[in-house]
Amino acid sequence: MTAIQISNVQKRYKSLQALGGVSLSIEEGEFFGLLGPNGAGKTTLISIIAGLNRADAGTVQIHGHDVVSDFRAARRKLGVVPQELVFDPFFTVRETLRLQSGYFGLPNNDKWIDEVMENLDLTNKADTNMRALSGGMKRRVLVAQALVHKPPVIVLDEPTAGVDVELRQTLWKFISRLNREGHTIVLTTHYLEEAQAMCKRVAMLKAGQVVALDTMSSLIRKVAGSQLIVHLKAGDIPDDLRHLVLHAEPVDSGKKYSLKVNEYSEVEQILARLRANGAVIDEMQLQQADLEDIFLQIMEKGAL
Ligand SMILES: Nc1ncnc2c1ncn2[C@@H]1O[C@H](COP(=O)(O)OP(=O)(O)OP(=O)(O)O)[C@@H](O)[C@H]1O
């Protein structure tokens, strides 16, 4: 069954086209990453999925329920962990979670609430008022709140932005468990290492368009294994090597290039060409490609 079906979703804010016709199909049980630079449209898409924002055109269905015409049924299937922390400061953690349960028509939900609190290390804060919690603790409550009705589809918008290592580990352990138990997970994050470790499939958004959609392993394979990183303190890349440049940036002492290397035997030839062209190498390194390299390539060139 399809967990989230997004069909040609468009959204405009005055003159800005935030989403320019996004279509994605996320299957039940997937661990899916939604990646993209600031302003790419991730949060806009998530708020449309959550029924908090209306698309100008296109449709979204959660487990077959349209998020507009069948809002309540769609919402029941979905748990969203939003980016921003918004709470009523006068309730305790347990009261906050009970209220959320009531909102979904689940008045006797304490067993699951206790389990969620236990898994997010919130048990000893159960009777603490929200206003007395640290930012990291509040974020745990935000996650707990999204899970209170045991939704089959869980969407996390930047859940680890600015949180410490301990919470990250607690959170990923619990989310991985829920995914193993069959929950569909959709994650946005700017921590690409985290996305690489967790997500089996990713979509990359750029200026409101899907510019890449593939499994993590096949995306990484497309970047042909390795990269040669060279810092040049003088000279430049000769024209006949330009096609190998994946990424270039100025550094204090000159310029840093990432060059695509298909086989290790090519490294010597590249270095010889650089020297013959008058380039002076300050530092070099051979590195396996990772999601960050792919992300930079896609965002710079628009494709692999
Ligand atoms: N309510 C709004 N009114 C006007 N413009 C908006 C509104 N919400 C978002 N935008 C604009 O739409 C674009 C997409 O924003 P969105 O927040 O969806 O991006 P994002 O990919 O989630 O970015 P980030 O990684 O920074 O969270 C941005 O240019 C943003 O400025």
Image: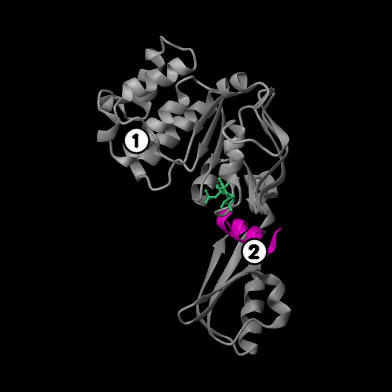
Overall secondary structure of the magenta section? helix
Q: Residue 45: percent from the left, percent from the top?
A: 61, 40
- In the image, 228 versus 203, the foreground residue is 203
The dot on residue 111 is: none
Split into 4 quadrants, where in the image is the N terminus? Answer: top right
Q: Residue 179: percent from the left, percent from the top?
A: 53, 29
In the displayed structure image, the side of residue 111 where residue 226 appears, left or right: right
The dot on residue 138 is: 1
Q: Residue 206: percent from the left, percent from the top?
A: 65, 53
Where are the magenta residues, as a range?
Answer: 289-304
The answer to whether one can see residue 200 in this image is no
> Which residue corresponds to mark 2?
300
In the displayed structure image, the side of residue 26 where residue 178 appears, left or right: left
Residue at (32, 25) in percent of width and height: 93
Examine the rendered structure and indicate whether residue 108 appears above or below residue 175. Answer: above
Residue depth check, mark 2 versus mark 1: number of the one nearer the observer? 1
Q: For disc 1, does the CB lie below 8 Å from ligand 1? A: no
